[in-house]
Image: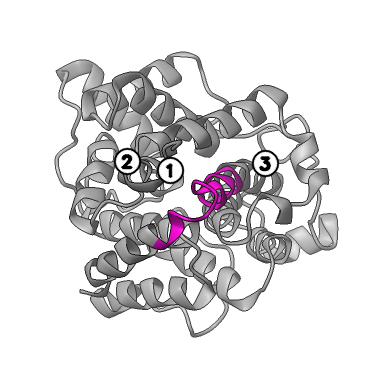
């Protein structure tokens, strides 16, 4: 399997990064990934559930962080995509590693604070955990939503440098609290590995190899056909739109504008595209006008977690520690 095979190449890259000023480039890209997640969420939330034609009618081309939308957000306010990521990241840092019970408790605490938005599968998973104390839902063929993928960035950062099986196991710890589904698992692992490849200096061609490996495993993810518009929360729809936007553009801004103007579940396609593109192009490529409008508390939390989560990673143990 190509996703697993690439782990040996990544380990070679780790050694090359040892001479890169202590791996500062990796930490910068990690910050780009987290800020990219948040700005993609905030940008996309304005047009969530609109069709492309409705977006054109209301906004022309939507390209600014302005809030509003069906959730009536403040300018720069984020949704469950970013909030659940930060909750998961905080649980990993507090626990010193990925733990399903810690993740479930973090999600439960997040829901207790009445978030602005929450998906039905997420709500059901958290409610089941509260009732049973078991941080894993039974496998369900109908739980192939994008809720586990949208919050996977802390796993990518905390496990960069690990082999694919370890990364997969860590991701399932958080994913299965709400989404226990092999299609969701496969897509989420692919997204995580794409982020990690970008953190290590991979280019769009390297990321495309990972996307194509996912397609080889499950043809439902084929993305090189007609333009995917109005994507639903079904993980296949979400990931196809993300891949198309990522590989049809050559900058962070153009990728994000492309994907959110497809409408549908635009906060989540924006968040996932943002985390990958943020790692690929780095934080300097994220428009300052978007970052500036983010809620200050969210912006600072993203930057802090990006730095601290990478310190837990196998990569940090190999080459990122101060000499």
Left or right relative to 196: residue 24: right
Mark 3–mark 1 distance (CA, rounded to whole Å):
31 Å
Q: Is residue 17 magenta?
A: yes
* Residue under label 1: 320
| Residue 129: image location, x then y, percent | 23, 23
Q: Residue at x 26, y 75 (%)?
A: 2
Between disc 3 and disc 1, the foreground one is 1
Closer to the camera in the image, 110 or 170: 170
Region rendered in magenta: 16-32
Mark 1–mark 2 distance (CA, rounded to whole Å):
7 Å
Q: Residue at x 49, y 14 (%)?
A: 113
First of labels 3, 1 by sequence position: 3
Secondary structure mostly seen in magenta is helix
Q: Residue at x 35, y 34 (%)?
A: 312
Q: Which mark is residue 57?
A: none
Closer to the camera in the image, 207 or 109: 207
Left or right relative to 249: residue 198: left
Q: Quadrant of the N terminus?
A: bottom left
* Residue under label 3: 42
Secondary structure found at label 3 = helix
Left or right relative to 321: residue 303: right
Asked whether the residues under the numbered discs 1 and 2 touch, taking CB atoms below 8 Å apart as contact, a structural biologist would say: yes
Q: Which mark is residue 317?
A: 2
Q: Is residue 173 above or below residue 195?
A: above
């Amino acid at each position: 399997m190509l996703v697993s095979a690439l782990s040996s190449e990544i380990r070679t890259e780790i050694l090359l990064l040892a001479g890169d000023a202590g791996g500062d480039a990796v930490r910068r890209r990690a910050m780009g990934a987290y800020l990219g997640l948040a700005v993609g969420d905030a940008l996309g939330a304005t047009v969530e559930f609109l069709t492309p034609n409705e977006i054109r009618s209301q906004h022309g081309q939507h390209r600014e962080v302005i809030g509003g939308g069906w959730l009536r957000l403040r300018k720069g306010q984020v949704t469950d995509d970013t909030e659940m990521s930060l909750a998961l990241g905080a649980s990993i840092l507090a626990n010193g590693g990925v733990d399903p019970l810690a993740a479930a408790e973090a999600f439960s605490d997040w829901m207790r604070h009445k978030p602005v938005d929450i998906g039905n599968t997420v709500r059901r998973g958290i409610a089941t955990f509260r009732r049973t104390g078991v941080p894993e839902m039974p496998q369900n063929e109908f739980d192939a939503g994008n809720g586990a993928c949208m919050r996977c960035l802390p796993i990518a950062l905390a496990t960069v440098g690990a082999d694919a099986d370890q990364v997969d196991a860590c991701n399932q710890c958080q994913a299965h609290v709400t989404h226990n589904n092999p299609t969701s698992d496969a897509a989420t692992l692919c997204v995580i590995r794409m982020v990690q490849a970008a953190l290590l200096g991979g280019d769009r061609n390297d990321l495309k190899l990972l996307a194509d490996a996912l397609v080889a495993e499950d043809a439902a993810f084929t993305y090189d056909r007609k333009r995917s518009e109005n994507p639903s929360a079904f993980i296949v729809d979400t990931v196809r739109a993300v891949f198309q936007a990522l590989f049809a553009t050559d900058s962070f801004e153009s990728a994000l504008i492309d994907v959110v103007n497809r409408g549908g579940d635009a906060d989540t396609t924006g968040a996932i595209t943002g985390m990958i593109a943020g790692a690929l192009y780095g934080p300097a490529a994220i428009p300052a006008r978007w970052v500036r409008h983010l809620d200050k508390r969210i912006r600072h939390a993203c930057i802090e977690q990006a730095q601290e989560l990478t310190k837990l990673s196998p990569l940090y143990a190999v080459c990122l520690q101060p000499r």
